[in-house]
Amino acid sequence: MPDYPTATPGVLTSLNSGAYADTGGTGERILVDYKDAIMDYKVTDLPVMDFFAEPMSTDTGGNIDITFAQPSMKLEMLDEGNTPQYQHTKLRSERISVKEWGIATAVTRRMIEDSRFNEVEMALTEARRAVDRHMTEHVVKVIFGGAADTTFGTYAITAATTEANLDNFANNVYGGFFGASMAAADINAEGSRLVSYANESAARLIRGSYYNAVNSGVGAFALADITKAIDRISTHGYNATHLFISPAHYHHLLNIGDFVTAFTAAQGGQAGAAANPTTTLNNPTNPFHTTASTGLVGNLYGLNVVVNAWVPSDRIGVFDLSVKPMVYVERRPLTVEEANPGFGIVGSYMSMRYGLKVVRPSVGAIVINA
């Protein structure tokens, strides 16, 4: 059986009459069991909307503005007979770009008539999977900031990316968590996303949410990276709840916990770090020994650890998901329409109109294996 290319200029149907190579040709005859024809590969699921997004709907097209309240009022000490000054609510606005996305499937009337399978069901099933993959990839690239993508228009965020670039809609329509180069003057400043919290010092509040890991290399994992993320999220009044890692990071984490490799100062992040929080992984009752289909594999420092192949292998994400970091605005949900009947294509066009953006920069931290 020949190797299939990554692109299919023609349509290879179950009639084995389509082209599968740039030079054309006929597919070999293959017996396919009907039950497996609909579910022929495992879908890697990462329910990004459940994890990261707060859904909203709107009847207005184009860009959407969402307003958030910020701390602004405080009590005053009054002299006898005086009245306090009038105070107003301070607001912050976030603009979300809404665009249309669509997919067309190559199902014709002849394919329906002559095929041994339900071509429409197969095509629509795969199209819906494509939508799921699209949404997952879009959200992951926005949340983790790991790659510039011309299709999505995402921005490649590094530890050196400034807050001004992340906060500027013209530069980055998807926003992000706190960037670098913030100053004490930015706290509570007009137009700033950074606000003071409790008794935290300015030096701690202005730390960015994107920082390089202790160790470099794909999948490198150090416990100090996680504790740093927990600290930076807590600085702004939130408590980290979830740790998202790739299979490469999970491999290194298991090596630490099961002592396949020596537990080193570099992994712990401090000299003589004897308190290994994953030591109890050797206990078969520890949840790390049970990998659920959801990707939740256990707890580390009180964080729910989620392993998924969609997570970039060079980035780790720590979040407080009791408050969703992203807003997902849906102008029109996924709809299926009939394409131009002159070409004999039936019910094969589906599209949706939506926008998304990171709007709560305080609830996440991204560790980068630079």
Image (cartoon, rainbow, N blue to C red):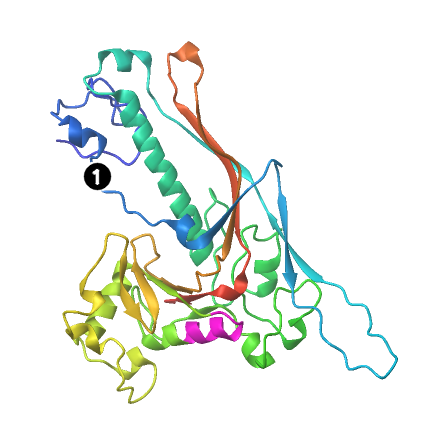
**In the picture, which quadrant includes the C terminus?**
bottom left
Residue 247, percent across and down?
A: 26, 59
Quadrant assignment, res 70: bottom right
Residue 363 drawn above or below residue 171: below
Q: Nearer the viewer, residue 24 or 168?
A: 168
Q: Nearer the viewer, residue 289 or 307?
A: 289
Residue 5, percent across and down?
A: 25, 34
Q: Which residue is mark 1?
A: 41
Residue 352, percent across and down?
A: 48, 33
Q: Is residue 174 left or right of residue 344?
A: right
Q: Nearer the viewer, residue 21 or 160?
A: 160
Visible in this render: residue 43? yes
Q: Main secondary structure of the magenta part?
A: helix
Q: Which span is picked out in magenta?
A: 228-238
Residue 263, percent across and down?
A: 22, 80
Asked which secondary structure carries label 1, the reply is: loop
Give the amino acid at mark 1. Answer: Tyr
Quadrant assignment, res 279: bottom left
Residue extending farthest to the right is 81
What residue is rendered at 27% in x and 26% in y? 122
Q: Residues within 10 Å of mark 1 (few under 14, many from 20)?
A: few
Q: Is residue 39 magenta?
A: no
